[in-house]
Image (cartoon, rainbow, N blue to C red):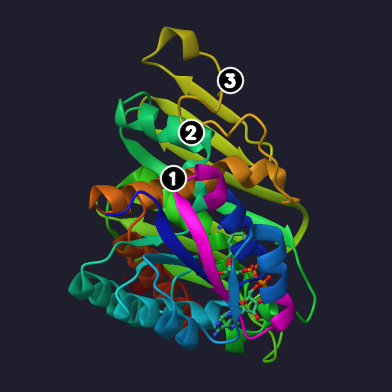
């Protein structure tokens, strides 16, 4: 494995560029080429992130440039086809969430990555939020006993005729933001979901759903209430976990973490935990100069890129794997099936 990985980008829109700047900060990769049918996006990625060459087709880039790995950050309906093309060209792939539009396509991608013996990581950034990492650690240490209930949601206000509202492109809050909430909850719970009962609000046929509420059941009487919405007056996400010995709550975007525990004397009363980023995610270089506007997320994106490049050089699965991507998609399939039928759906 060479010292520095040769990277390409498929989908040079805002997230593709954010991730590229984060990748550059790991100092483990050369940003070689980017591709996007939108010429302006390609040009911006060259100027902002330092890619050396731009292509209007990912296939052409994969064919012509010698790359070790690619980031795929396209519109949702192009994530799986582009990631599959890259995997089949023998590249390691970091693909943004939701990875595919259904579990069958997700499984096809995971199988292709296994066949090609390349790493496949999915962009569930909130797994790199220091508060969520500490929450998972405390849960695994038994700080609140056995989990009996959980609640997770991700809500923003979003109403335009953007592709993120277009069902043809895999728009809608479930894929765009709810995927983060459900992925994080499944990670915390660590059990296989079995059944879903969902209420999905489709405002009209031209637009994707505007809101989802679902009860996701697990064996042993544990249930997760999940919510995703484009109809919120603020950007708000939460992850509540109730256990036999207490509870924890983590909030986005305030990034607060609360705990109450009968087992730990210091937390017998509801307590807000101070969570310094270190030692949970790598420090940013001192003069971390990025043109990234959403600078507050940059440390998490750097941590994601650090994990992806480490998985490649160490020849191991990334901590957020293609199998995790499929697990969310299986739940999403069941949410849409239940929302349409009005009946519970098996996962
Ligand atoms: N994890 C996170 O923190 C986070 C945050 C925001 C967005 N995202 C995800 O990133 C992805 C991109 O979102 P965005 O906000 O950058 O959208 P965007 O609209 O800014 O960019 C998407 C780009 O994909 C390009 N594209 C479409 N088809 C393509 C193809 N076949 N090949 C190459 N490029 C193609 C478009 O031209 C566009 O430039 C989505 O999956 C989104 O959910 C993740």
- Horizontal relation, residue 237 to residue 194: left or right: right
Relative image position of residue 229 (x, y in whole percent) = 66, 63
Residue located beneath label 2 in the image: 282
Image quadrant of ligand 1 equals: bottom right
Q: Position of residue 322 (x, y in %)?
A: 33, 64
Front-most of residues 26 and 72: 26
SS for dot 1: helix
Separation (CA) of disc 2 from disc 3:
18 Å
Q: Is ligand 1 less than 8 Å from the beta carbon at label 3?
A: no
Task: For label 2, count other residues whose C-alpha is less than 10 Å away and answer few (under 14), some (14-19) or many (20+).
Answer: some
The CA span between labels 3 and 1 is 24 Å
Taking depth in this image into account, of 44 and 303 the one nearest to the observer is 44
**Can residue 229 be seen in the rendering of this structure?**
no
- Residue at the image point whose x is 30% and y is 81% from the top: 88
Q: Which residue is mark 1?
A: 306
Task: Tell me, yes or no, whether the two marked residues, 2 and 1, touch with CB atoms within 8 Å.
Answer: yes
Q: Height in image: 122 above or below 83?
A: above
Nearer to the camera, 189 or 62: 62
Q: Residue at x 58, y 40 (%)?
A: 299
Of the numbered discs 3 and 1, the one sitting upstream in the chain is: 3
Query: Residue placed at 78% from the left, 82% from the top?
Result: 161
Q: Which mark is residue 274?
A: 3
Specify whether residue 206 is painted magenta: no
Segment tinted magenta in the rendering: 23-41
Figure quadrant of the C terminus? bottom left
């Amino acid at each position: 494995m060479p010292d520095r990985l040769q990277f390409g980008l498929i989908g040079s829109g805002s997230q593709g560029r954010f991730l590229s700047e984060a990748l550059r900060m790991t100092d483990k990769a050369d940003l070689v080429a980017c591709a996007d049918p939108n010429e302006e996006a390609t040009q911006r990625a060259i100027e902002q992130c330092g890619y050396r060459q731009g292509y209007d087709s990912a296939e052409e880039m994969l064919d012509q440039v010698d790359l070790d790995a690619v980031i795929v950050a396209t519109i949702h309906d192009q994530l799986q086809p582009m990631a599959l093309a890259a995997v089949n060209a023998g590249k390691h792939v970091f693909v943004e969430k939701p990875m595919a539009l259904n579990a069958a396509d997700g499984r096809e991608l995971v199988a292709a990555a296994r066949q090609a013996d390349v790493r496949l990581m999915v962009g569930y950034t909130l797994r790199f939020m220091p508060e969520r990492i500490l929450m998972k650690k405390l849960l695994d240490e038994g700080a609140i006993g056995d989990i009996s209930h959980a609640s997770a949601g991700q809500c923003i206000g979003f109403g335009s005729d953007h592709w993120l509202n277009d069902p043809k492109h895999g728009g809608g809050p479930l894929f765009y933001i709810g995927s983060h909430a459900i992925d994080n909850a499944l990670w915390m719970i660590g059990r296989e979901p079995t059944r879903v009962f969902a209420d999905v609000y489709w405002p009209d046929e031209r637009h994707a759903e505007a809101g989802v509420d679902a009860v996701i059941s697990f064996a042993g009487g544990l249930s997760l209430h999940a919510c995703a919405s484009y109809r919120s007056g603020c950007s708000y996400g939460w992850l509540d976990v109730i256990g036999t010995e207490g509870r924890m709550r983590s909030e986005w975007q305030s990034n607060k973490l609360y705990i109450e525990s009968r087992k730990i004397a210091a937390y017998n009363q509801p307590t807000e935990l101070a969570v310094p980023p270190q030692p949970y995610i790598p420090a940013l270089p001192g003069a971390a100069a990025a043109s990234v506007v959403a600078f507050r997320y940059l440390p998490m994106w750097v941590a994601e890129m650090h994990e992806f490049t480490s998985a490649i050089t160490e020849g191991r699965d990334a901590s957020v794997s293609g199998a995790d991507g499929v697990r969310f998609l299986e739940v999403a399939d069941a949410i849409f099936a239940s929302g349409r039928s009005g009946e519970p759906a098996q996962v």
